Image: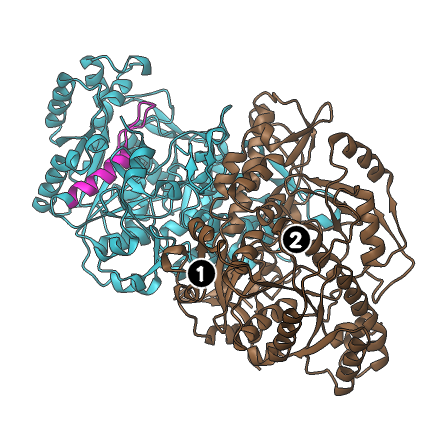
Chain colours: A cyan, B brown
Amino acid sequence: MKTDIEISQEAALDPIAKVAEQLNLSEDDLELHGKYKAKIDVSAMNKIHQNKEGKLILVTSINPTPAGEGKSTITIGLGDALNRIGKKTVIALREPSLGPVMGIKGGATGGGYAQVLPMEDINLHFTGDMHAITTANNALSALLDNHLHQGNELGIDPRRVIWKRVLDLNDRELRHVTVGLGGPINGVPREDGFDITVASEIMAILCLSTDILDLKRRLANIVVAYTYQREPVTVGDLKVEGALALILKEAIKPNLVQTIYHTPAFVHGGPFANIAHGCNSILATQTALHCGDYTVTEAGFGADLGGEKFLDIKVPNLGKSPDLVVIVATIRALKMHGGIVKSELSAENLAALEKGFRNLAKHIANMKKYGLPVVVAINEFISDTQKEIELLKDLCEKEGVKVELASVWEKGPEGGEALAKTVVEIIEEENNRFRSIFSREDDTLQEKIETIVTEIYGGSGVVYSKKAQQQLETFKRYGWDRLPVCMAKTQYSLSDDPEKLGAPEEFTVTIREFVPKIGAGFIVALTGDVMTMPGLPKKPAALNMDVDKNGQAIGLF
Amino acid sequence: MKTDIEISQEAALDPIAKVAEQLNLSEDDLELHGKYKAKIDVSAMNKIHQNKEGKLILVTSINPTPAGEGKSTITIGLGDALNRIGKKTVIALREPSLGPVMGIKGGATGGGYAQVLPMEDINLHFTGDMHAITTANNALSALLDNHLHQGNELGIDPRRVIWKRVLDLNDRELRHVTVGLGGPINGVPREDGFDITVASEIMAILCLSTDILDLKRRLANIVVAYTYQREPVTVGDLKVEGALALILKEAIKPNLVQTIYHTPAFVHGGPFANIAHGCNSILATQTALHCGDYTVTEAGFGADLGGEKFLDIKVPNLGKSPDLVVIVATIRALKMHGGIVKSELSAENLAALEKGFRNLAKHIANMKKYGLPVVVAINEFISDTQKEIELLKDLCEKEGVKVELASVWEKGPEGGEALAKTVVEIIEEENNRFRSIFSREDDTLQEKIETIVTEIYGGSGVVYSKKAQQQLETFKRYGWDRLPVCMAKTQYSLSDDPEKLGAPEEFTVTIREFVPKIGAGFIVALTGDVMTMPGLPKKPAALNMDVDKNGQAIGLF
């Protein structure tokens, strides 16, 4: 069996200008980054957006388990398969963060014969978007601290600075730091911390912005601190939204790459799916939608997190809802949801599969609450038995959804043909009947959280910590109490307890604290500790990395 | 009078592929970054290096003053002028750091009609080299701290970690920090600090490396800490030089841009000229040398700092010495060296000019000690009087050097024609008689410092602090006592006292401390406080920056 990197290095890439031709884009519409990556020029985007809008397919999944689901792989493979059956299809994915690449072997560009390329570039610096976000984030910190140092005209309380610095690295050492030490010429001493770049509010903002002016408007709204009078201080108060937008003027442009089979793929933006909304950029999705008849995109983690946020946060900003949802599952992962440990997953176990199916069933039901047609994609594994596959198909049919085996990892587009055909059939049959799960757009934060917990998670109610209750009071005063909510919850369970697999019932969800992300336009509700700066393992992947005399990567994956 | 940004925005750039044609490079030899920037592919570099090597012109200057010298402007203008008189000429410059751009109005891409373009891109993210260096530097920090956290097999003393983190920003708040706070799961508490990226040893290494394997070898040699037994710990001990080289595999490739007049310019690498050697990359200079008949390059600060380091540190690594040195001076700056304050510089003052000329005379004499032909370029200012110009010419003639007025800022290549002709005439007449100022290559650190202080600075001797004396003993034990020395001295004076303008005499220079840069291959000798992380001013330039709806920069300069 070939490894991902072997398959990727054997692939013969087309010049990106040739890939762009499929989208009726000329070389003048592109800003090339080497031979196989390009950004789309602003004027080209304006031109593209006059085209007809195509159909949108959202790929999401059951709650992830250590057994793996392969959501990116299915997204890429489905895109290739749709092209194979003659549908002009474009893929829209998130771009990976460099930090984890140095830590744990494995990238974020699909796998097997369903990959976006050049995978080495995409996993390293790509077109510099992450670096621009890091720079904008930290320039804001430097400008804020300079304001404190140079007289603090705005009366900012240095103990109440909430804007943190970031690096695109896994660096636990920077989680909690003190800065401004060394006497009066070296700034104002205070506590601070670093998050990983993808956790920056600027990443969420970049991904939700519809153009550079919207980006600037959102940047200006970021709340960075509070005054001694506990009033919020924004980037607009510091008057630096223009400088930050300038730093981001290239990063906001969607990146075009290709799959192994030359399907055009926009890979752009990658916010967390817990403390942020977990989807690629609005601009990339919009550009894809106007370039192809079909766009396949994905959302982070499971349908309860990335899926919910795609529908409740991204869709209102995108102005377009999915025409169909694909839920990815593996038989191995469903057996884990049925209570089986990782070491025993290769043995046939129909009882565990049936028990674990309840997780998938809940996600199917949830997506239907939004009025969306659902197809289940079984990402095929070599250990799946015929009986297991048949049982899973039966169970899906009982839920009234189509299910298809997808073996794109092993077979590429051919392995996704059945899935592609079913998807097209349903989209061509059904009208888009998308509806919000909330009663009104301006439901209060509590009402929205209550709806998500009961309708989507299957919980019985919400508990608020004392701190969260106090924050709700303050938010009313600031006018933030009806903003969209962004749930920060464990991805492993439908509940807020990562141990509760399957489809837990009769649980409450505790809101520990709120984090306002006014620039992004939502309030994050923390249901537990969320790690916003990962660490490195004892033997980091970096130890195996190298480069040969021609500058070729060795041991990257 | 048009501003720099107006002139640059009016310029009609050639596609970079067309500029590359002048160097006999095809589009296949380039990695395009948009339409007007490119990196040179590794295979193309191998091809280029088989060409004949051209002549090398080093542009340096008197000790800088607040009146300004315009070294980059003369470098660019001379390159344009050489092309104008029919000499195939390439420019090799340092690339600017983003940090200062946010702080103080003014970029590092020349001025007037002698600019490299696109200036906005070059001054912002350019092709991502700085970001890659930042990432490599901080990945090393994260891997080092992870080593401490995961058991510290190498026995590193956390109090003796000398590797600092970096950001490409002016951020005084990060000069002195404590990291690893928050309990045992969040790393090992210790003191740390952030430098600006250009101060990273990795920047110096990137600029001195002759290829990617040399880069990796140098990275492995970096000393990051000492053990509890006071033994040096290197990147090689941590086994991460491969990963760092991988992060830098694109950054090591020279960047090609153009001047307003389409002269090819390699803009690559930009280490400090105090704590590092202050020259653009060896690879860029080599590539330029093999592409053109003439290469014009510059070194940081004055001839006593950047100039000396170009000749004593860069030349041995480059394997090629300059064929001629241009020393840039302005009449205004010479008058400051003659004791006149900035507000009175516009008035004619022959006495002050004659007195200040001693600074220029010393630099002329110094360059002659290296056996190099010298030409003085007077960067013309509107306030220069005819009598002043004549006096300066007379003074230069008495020193036996040619002098030319250069008005490239105002007139572009035409304004540099006389300078270009004189330069060519001398180079064609004289043979390269370069010689080192040191007795032997393996002079001890003290011998080298003594030579630089007495021969170049004009001082009477060297004083070592107690700490420096102790370090010299330790370095003997580590085998570092005969490495090249990199002097970290004020740029404003030939002495180590910034107040002593002109050509001070009878002074001693105090070596306060040594900083080993074993990866770069030199020992830095600190003669005073060197600022390695600048701060922002009260009204940072960022406050005036903006971007319009088409993504065009506003207020960048």
Which quarter shows the C terminus of chain B?
A: bottom right
Q: Are marks 1 and 2 in contact (CB under 8 Å)?
A: no
Give yes or no for residue B412 being in the magenta stretch. Answer: no
Front one among A272 and B11? B11
Question: Tag on residue A403?
Answer: none
On the image, the x and y values in percent for residue A338 come to 26, 17
Image height of B463 relative to A154, above or below? above
The magenta span reads A61-83
On the image, the x and y values in percent for residue A280 come to 33, 46
Image height of A175 relative to A35, above or below? above
Q: Have a look at marks 1 and 2 and say if they share a chain.
A: yes
Q: Secondary structure at mark 1?
A: loop
Question: Tag on residue B315?
Answer: 2
Q: What distance separates the C-alpha of mark 1 from that of mark 2?
A: 27 Å
Q: In this rendering, would B340 be left or right of A67?
A: right
- Residue labelled with disc 1: B37
Front one among A55 and A432? A55
Q: Secondary structure at mark 2?
A: helix
Q: Which chain is indicated by disc 1?
A: B
Give yes or no for residue A76 being in the magenta stretch. Answer: yes
On the image, the x and y values in percent for residue A493 come to 33, 26
- Can you name the residue that lies furthest to the right here? B506
Report which quarter residue B13 is drawn in.
bottom left
User: What's the residue type where badge 2 is placed?
Assistant: Val
